[in-house]
Each structure stands twice: as structure tokens, then as C-alpha cells.
Image (spheres, helix red, strand yellow):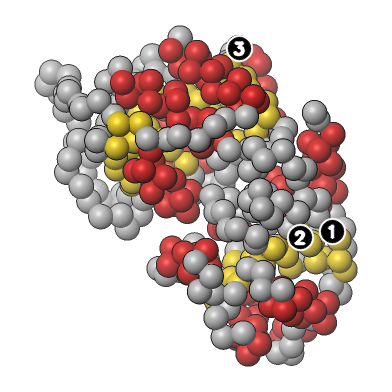
Amino acid sequence: MCSCEDLITWAGPSYFVKQASPHFTWTGTLTSQQQKAAHALNESLQRKRNHLIHAVCGAGKTEILFAAIHKALEQNKRVCVATPRTDVVLELYPRFLQVFQNITIHALYGGAEPNSQFAQLVLATTHQLYRFEQAFDVMIVDEADAFPYTYDQALQSAVLKAKKLDAPIAFVTATPSTKLLNQRQKEDWGYSFIARRFHGFLLPVPQYQPLWNYEKAFKKNRIPQKLLHWVNKRLENNEPFLIFFPTIDLMERAVSLFQAIEPTIESVHSEDPMRKEKVLQLRNEQRKGLLTTTILERGITIKNVQVAVVGSESPIFTASALIQISGRVGRNPQFPNGQIVFFHHGITLEMDRACKKILEMNCYE
């Protein structure tokens, strides 16, 4: 959305389009915790009550949403699944197309192809909700703690504007903010908590590795020895990997050094027009690894991926971000014990908070 675009509202009768019944094709099985959360969510939405799903990374949050969305679509309600990140929309869209057939589904994000059809189910970045006013009977905000939604009052207002006045909101996140938790308690929302991944294995716990003067090493056109050893080990084991960097400048300085070791290694960031294709290539084993900013901290699932964070002491790596980054690892039941390493120039409170929270989740039954 640009400030120069016109937004036009309809002042006539309510616009109502009778939709075909959705063909629900999902045949998976929910765990007992997922089933309990799915039932509670559906009950809240039917009662037009807000609901918070607080579930660890890899708990199968998307699958929990399916039944409630299907119920709403059967009732000819219009549903929106909004998220702060384009990557999450791109990850969800093909899955929703497969599960909800026989209806029109739109995916809206910056650069998406325009579509004039009326969609009963809309997947959108929160920025795209500026386009809507009292349009949705059910609003779901996925990754409700993600930047920039949590820091931008305008985006939060856009969510409220886009839904009908009495429409409920379901918030879905692995790392809810204190504000969100307090709001759900104060306003008596429905609440579901899941501390276990769908496959039942524990969350991988980050390892600390000091990487002194890493910025100086990259400026001298060399990869720090411990990081080089880690990458070579991943290549030797044929394991896909993500390496998170605190800044685009440092990442772009490093990428050519990694390409000298393995030509398929690439970098991605928020302004990269090929980001979608590069992630897909990593998923399809056409690339060995990606260097990335926090743009890939969530909304991406790669089988057997190993993860390193360079400069985890940087302020951009909050506890929430580090938990989400760690959550990329071990999501597949065939590879539940992947490696997550925090390469640092000094341990921070945020690093310790992230590890403490992951260990705490592992203690729940």
C-alpha cells in the first residue's frame, strides 16, 4: 500500500456473495493437545469471543486453525488470516489452497498479482488490511508478536478496521508479548496453551559459542574459524543450514566468502526480490544454505535445517526473535534434534531469557 493510492468505500447495501461449500481435504490427525486447542478455538469463534493460541514453534498451529476456519466457511462467513510477514503468507498459501478447495482464496502482500474475484478466505500481511473495512466475520492474526505489527499502532488499528464490529479475533503466537497476555486476561478471552511440538520431541536448546571479533574477521575477508568449522560440518553431513546475521551490510560482506567454499550459498533480506525463490531452492535441496537477516526468523519450515546466529548479542536479536529462530530447528519428526548455535561476542540477558524459556517449555508435560 502507498499513501498515494485511493481507498474507496461502498456506501450502498451490504455486498454479499453466496459461496460454494468448501471442499475440506485435510486428512491429518491432531494430537490430544492440538484437538483440545482446536475445539476451544472453534467454540470461542462461534461465541464471537476473542481467543489466544499460545503454542511453541512447531506445535502445528496452522493445523489447529483448519477446523474452525472450515466451520466458518461452511456458515458462509468471510475469514481473514493476517500476519506481519510476507514469508508467512507465502508459506501458508499453498497449504490453504490444498486444504480448502472449491472456494476462492486470495494471498495479499507487497508485489502480489491483483485479483478482482471475491475471496471468501483471504491470507494477507497486516499492511494489506488497510484495503478493507468491516469486511471479515472472523479475523485470525498469526505470528501476533512479530515486527512490525507489535510496534505499529496503525497496523493494530487496521486489524480492527478490517473486521466487522462484532467479529472475533484469534491471536496465534509462540511468543506472546506481556501486553497480549495481560489483554487476554483482562478481557477474558479464550486461551489455549501447547508446550509440546506435534511430534512429541523436546525443543532443541541453543548452544553458546564465543566468536570474538567476528566483524573484524569479515572485514579482513575471512570467516571466523569456529563458524567456518560449523559450516564445513554441515556441508560434510549434507545438512541444509541458515545463518542469521544482525545486519545486511555484514551479511553481504560475508556471502562471497561462503560462496568460495560452496557456490550455492546465497543471502536473503527483506528487499531481496528473489527471496521466495531462494528459500524454495533451499527446501528443494538445490542450495546448501542461506545467509539471512531476521526476515526468516519465522514462517519457514525446512526439513533437517541446522541454524547458527552470528552476533547473537546484537540488540536486534531479542529473546522473542531468538526463540523463533531456534524454532526453525527440529520441526520434522524424522529430524527432531537439529542444532542451533548462538555465536556471540558476549552473552546477553536476551540470550539467557530465550534459553530459559525454551528449557521451561521442555519441562511441561
Q: Residues within 10 Å of mark 3 (few under 14, many from 20)?
A: few
Q: Which residue is mark 1?
A: 207
Q: Earlier in the sequence, mark 1 or mark 3?
A: 3
Q: Position of residue 359 (x, y in %)?
A: 84, 41
SS at circle 2 = loop
Q: Is residue 297 visible?
A: yes
Q: Earlier in the sequence, mark 2 or mark 3?
A: 3
Q: Residue at coordinates 43% horizontally, 12% vertically from top-left?
A: 46
| Distance in Å between CA atoms under marks 1 and 2 | 8 Å
Whether residues under marks 1 and 2 lie with C-beta atoms below 8 angstroms apart, the answer is: yes
- Residue nearer the viewer, 110 or 227: 227
Answer left or right for 160 relative to 216: left
Residue type pointed to by label 2: Gln
- Quarter of the figure with the C terminus: top right
Q: Position of residue 333 (x, y in %)?
A: 66, 48
Instruction: Name the residue at the left extreme.
Output: 12
Residue type pointed to by label 1: Gln
Residue 14 found in image quarter:
top left
> Of the residues tagged 1 and 2, which is closer to the observer?
2
Q: Position of residue 131 (x, y in %)?
A: 29, 39
Residue 91 is marked as: none
| Distance in Å between CA atoms under marks 2 and 3 | 39 Å
Q: Is residue 131 visible?
A: no
| Distance in Å between CA atoms under marks 1 and 3 | 38 Å
Count of marks placed on residues: 3
Q: Which residue is mark 3?
A: 188
Q: Is residue 225 above or below residue 171?
A: below
Q: Earlier in the sequence, mark 1 or mark 2?
A: 1
- Residue nearer the viewer, 313 or 115: 115
Q: Residue at coordinates 26% horizontally, 51% vertically from top-left?
A: 4
Q: Which residue is mark 2?
A: 339
Q: Residue at coordinates 56% horizontally, 54% vertically from top-left?
A: 301
